[in-house]
Image (cartoon, helix red, strand yellow):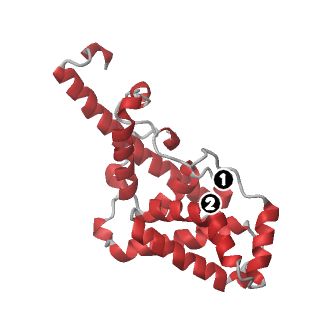
C-alpha cells in the first residue's frame, strides 16, 4: 500500500536527496560557528525535520519542541559528526530519537498499541488466514480521500514510536532502508521488518474501514451486494 495515495508527502511531491555540496557548505558553516549557520540549518532541514517529528509525536507543539531541541543538539555536537553517514541521516536520527523520547515520556506502555493484537492472522504457511478483499478501486475514490486520510492517520498514531518513525521515513519521505537504519540506529533487517509490520497494521485498519463502508452502502442500497 502506498501511503502517498492518501497522505500528503512533500509540498512538491518529491523526495530527492539534498546535494552533497550543499550539505558540505552547511557543515563548514556550522563547524566554524558562522553567525547565520543555525538559520541555514533551519532553512535547509526545518520543514522535513518538523514533518518527521510531527508524524512521530502526533502533536504540533511537541514536534516544535522536538525540532528546537534536536537542532540545538546538532549545533552543539556538530564536531562529533564524522561523515560516516549522510549529514541528513545523522540529523534525522537526532530528530527521531528526540521525538520517540517525547512520545515515551507522555504515553505509558499500557496505552501503546500491541501490534500482535491488530496484525492480520496468518496460517502455518504464512498466508492470510482470512480472505483479503480487493478494495483498491474504491480506496482511490476522491470522495473517500478525506475519510481514508483520517483512518490512516489514526492508525499511524497508534503505532509504537519506533515503528511510526520507520514508516514515515520509508513510505512518506522515500528514504532508502540503509539510510533509515543509520538514522534510527537499527539494522537494515529490522527496518524492513518494522516497515512491513506497520504496513500490515495500516492495511488491516483500512480493510476494516472499507468493510464497514461497503456493508453500510449495501444496507442503504447505494451499491449492489453483488459488487462486494
Q: Is residue 159 left or right of residue 178?
A: left
Q: Is residue 70 left or right of residue 83?
A: left
Q: Looking at the picture, does residue 51 appear above or below residue 127?
A: below
Position in image of residue 117 (x %, y %):
31, 53
Q: Examine the rendering and report whether any part of residue 94 can be seen.
A: yes
Q: Residue at x 25, y 16 (%)?
A: 225
Where disc 2 sits, the SS reads helix
Q: Quadrant of the C terminus?
A: top left
Q: Residue furthest front?
A: 36
What residue is disc 2 on? 180
Where disc 1 sits, the SS reads loop
- What numbered label is drawn on residue 176? 1
Q: Residue at x 52, y 52 (%)?
A: 195
Q: Crowdedness of circle 1 by 10 Å Cα count: few (<14), some, many (20+)?
A: few
Q: Residue at x 76, y 67 (%)?
A: 23
Position in image of residue 57 (x %, y %):
42, 65
Q: Is residue 10 left or right of residue 141?
A: right
Q: How far is the residue under mark 2 from the one under mark 1? A: 6 Å
Q: Residue furthest left?
A: 219
Q: Nearer the viewer, residue 11 or 204?
A: 11
- What numbered label is drawn on residue 125? none
Q: Are marks 2 and 1 in contact (CB under 8 Å)?
A: yes
Amino acid at each position: 500500500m502506498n501511503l502517498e495515495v492518501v497522505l500528503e508527502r512533500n509540498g512538491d511531491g518529491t523526495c530527492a536527496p539534498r546535494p552533497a555540496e550543499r550539505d558540505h557548505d552547511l557543515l563548514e558553516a556550522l563547524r566554524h560557528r558562522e553567525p547565520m549557520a543555525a538559520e541555514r540549518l533551519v532553512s535547509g532541514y526545518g520543514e522535513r525535520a518538523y514533518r518527521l517529528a510531527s508524524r512521530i509525536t502526533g502533536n504540533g507543539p511537541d514536534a516544535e519542541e522536538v525540532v528546537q531541541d534536536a537542532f540545538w543538539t546538532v549545533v552543539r555536537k556538530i564536531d562529533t559528526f564524522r561523515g560516516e553517514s549522510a549529514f541528513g541521516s545523522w540529523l534525522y536520527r537526532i530528530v527521531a530519537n528526540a521525538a520517540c523520547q517525547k512520545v515515551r515520556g507522555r504515553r505509558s506502555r499500557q496505552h501503546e498499541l500491541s501490534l500482535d493484537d491488530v496484525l492480520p492472522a496468518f496460517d502455518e504457511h504464512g498466508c492470510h488466514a482470512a480472505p483479503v478483499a480487493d478494495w483498491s478501486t474504491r480506496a482511490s475514490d476522491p470522495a473517500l480521500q478525506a475519510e481514508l486520510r483520517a483512518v490512516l492517520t489514526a492508525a499511524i498514531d497508534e503505532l509504537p514510536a519506533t515503528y511510526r518513525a520507520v514508516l514515515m521515513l520509508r513510505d512518506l519521505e522515500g528514504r532508502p532502508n540503509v539510510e533509515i537504519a543509520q538514522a534510527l540506529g537499527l539494522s537494515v533487517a529490522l527496518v524492513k521488518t518494522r516497515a512491513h509490520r506497520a504496513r500490515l497494521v495500516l492495511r488491516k485498519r483500512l480493510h476494516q474501514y472499507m468493510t464497514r463502508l461497503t456493508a453500510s452502502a449495501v444496507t442503504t442500497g447505494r451499491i449492489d451486494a453483488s459488487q462486494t
